[in-house]
Image: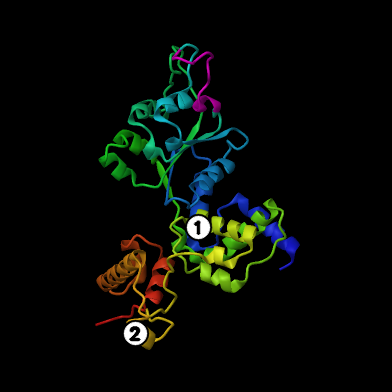
Amino acid sequence: MDPSREHDIFCGLHERLLGLTPQILEVDAMITQLANSQLTVLITGETGTGKDIAARLIHHRSTRYGMPFIKVNCPGIPESILESELFGYERGAFTGAHTAKPGRFELANGGTIFLDEISEMAESIQGKLLQVLDGEPFMRIGGTTPIRSNVRIIAATNVALDQAVKQHALREDVSFRLREVEVHLPPLRERLDDIPLLVEHFNYNISKSLKKNYEPIDSKFVAQLQRLPYPGNVRELAARVKKYVATGSEADLLASEEVLPPSGANGESAGGAGEENDPENRRFPSLKEAVRQAVEETERKLIEETLRHTLWNRRKAAKLLNTSYSSLLRRIEAYQIGKTP
């Protein structure tokens, strides 16, 4: 590919979610659809799936673009000062309050506030947040003047809100108001076909930021990257590529204690049966590998049972398993699941 053309492609991708798989295109289309609504949006997904990027895209595509976008990392701010950070305070409100300070809801007026990891917000602050969610005015700490802020609220969590409510970490009424509309970001393991595009995007931009010459990564290494489990999702992939660009080592790029089964894998060692049966050479699995094998066996059995239940209707099975159709097809192929009597 012409390097100038690569530049055009990669630089333009920051304006949408990176990926071309149906799962990510569906999310991207949903972001466009809801951007100009005033509904509160809850973004869910595992750590590292790009919830921050999705929130910024919602703001970027809305009529609020050009106004403030303010992110609040709820667990990153001590409970003792989170309320003052969000709602502000008046002079003399507490020891050390020598001057008045507006909160982030005021600073975000006309724009968007992004409450990351909302389930970590202290319950003592959630009542005041509910006022804002309901469109009511709030007051700074120590203040007497009601303040209204025209702000779009987007929240994100990597845990199920229902579970957070059961554990009394989140008020039920706050939970209901947060999810007027929900956007779920799929984990990287469910969109492995996006990895080549993601790798080249990160490779180009990281090379540029580190003032390194851009060198495409060999396709055989990219193929191997598609077999890693990625508990850290897209963030982990970006970190791997950054380390590779900095060191030039493919070992750093591929280093992992776990590898997903390749398509059609039958579980046999590349060393041959004789080597595996030799007590001196026998390799005992690590605890992580043993857990992975147990998970795969459970997953395979669950898929088979669901397919039998749906009379081998794979789309119905995918819906019952709460996974994407393409992800289910990959697993059926990887586990060599066939129709059985």
- Whether the residues at callouts 1 and 2 have beta carbons within 8 Å, the answer is no
The answer to which of 167 and 330 lies nearer the viewer is: 167
Q: Main secondary structure of the magenta part?
A: loop
Image quadrant of residue 280?
Answer: bottom left
126 left or right of 245? left
Q: CA distance from mark 1 to mark 2?
A: 47 Å
User: Label 1 is placed on what type of residue?
Assistant: Ile
Start-end of magenta stretch:
93-107
Residue that numbered label 1 is attached to: 24
Q: Spot the residue most to the front.
A: 280
The correct choice, above or below, for 261 with respect to 276 in the image is: above
- Quarter of the image containing the C terminus? bottom left
User: Image point 36% across, 83% down: which residue?
Assistant: 276
Give the x, y percent position of residue 48.
48, 51
Give the x, y percent position of residue 191.
48, 63
User: Image point 40% across, 86% down: which residue?
Assistant: 272
The answer to which of 118 and 98 lies nearer the viewer is: 98
The answer to which of 103 and 306 lies nearer the viewer is: 103
Mark 2 nearby-residue class (10 Å; few <14, some 14–19, many ≥20)? few
SS category of the residue bearing label 2: loop
Q: What color scheme is it?
A: rainbow
Residue that numbered label 2 is attached to: 278
**Between tags 1 and 2, which lies in front?**
2
Which of the two discs, 1 and 2, labels the residue nearer the N terminus?
A: 1
The correct choice, above or below, for 86 with respect to 336 in the image is: above
User: Image point 44% across, 11% down: which residue?
Assistant: 144
